């Protein structure tokens, strides 16, 4: 993955991203050395995810919203280094890009269907509760 190394206090960069419309999220995989992970909704169903690391670098990707099971399919995500650098430029954040930029301009393909996971989780939970209650009565 391409890295964007910032020459600013990482907490300041995080605050700027929050002001730009990103928000904290607890639904994420935490990578080693990660100190924050932010997400910003884009045009439906896309979102941009930015991770900040203790060594001062950032990583960004655009992917299907975590509201859908298709979020788990890596075929629906791409690096978002160029998009991130546009945001950093807008706020005058000094940075350097490290890594191979050949794959960061890929076009995103939208899945044929979007499957919301919350209704599925609710049905499974209700079935589980009903099962436990039926066992308790016997």
Image (cartoon, rainbow, N blue to C red):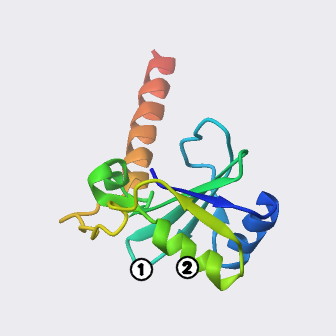
Viewer-closest of 71 and 100: 100
Judged from the image, the secondary structure of the residue bearing numbered disc 1 is loop
- Rendered image quadrant of residue 77: bottom left
| 24 sits to left or right of 82 | right
Q: Which residue is mark 2?
A: 86
- In the figure, 47 relative to 121: above or below? below
| Residue extending furthest toward the bottom | 90
- Rendered image quadrant of residue 92: bottom right
Q: Is residue 37 visible?
A: yes
Q: Which residue is mark 1?
A: 43
- In the figure, 93 relative to 14: above or below? below
At a point 64% along the width and 75% down the height, the residue shown is 88
At a point 47% along the width and 76% down the height, the residue shown is 42
Viewer-closest of 76 and 6: 6
Point out residue 78 in the picture as x, y percentages from the top left corner.
Answer: 36, 60
Viewer-closest of 10 and 30: 10
Judged from the image, the secondary structure of the residue bearing numbered disc 2 is helix
| Residue extending furthest toward the left | 112
């Amino acid at each position: 993955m391409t890295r964007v190394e910032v020459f600013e206090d990482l907490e300041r960069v995080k605050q700027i991203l929050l002001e730009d419309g990103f928000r904290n999220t607890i639904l994420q995989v935490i990578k080693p050395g990660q100190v924050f992970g932010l997400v910003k909704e884009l045009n439906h169903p896309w979102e941009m995810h930015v991770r900040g690391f203790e060594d001062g670098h950032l990583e960004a990707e655009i992917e299907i919203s975590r509201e859908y099971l298709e979020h788990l399919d890596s075929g629906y995500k791409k690096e978002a280094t160029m998009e991130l650098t546009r945001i950093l430029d807008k706020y005058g954040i000094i940075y350097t890009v490290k890594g191979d930029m050949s794959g960061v301009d890929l076009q995103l393909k939208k899945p044929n269907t979007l499957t919301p996971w919350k209704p599925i989780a609710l049905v499974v939970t209700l079935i589980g509760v009903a099962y436990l209650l039926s066992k308790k009565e016997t």
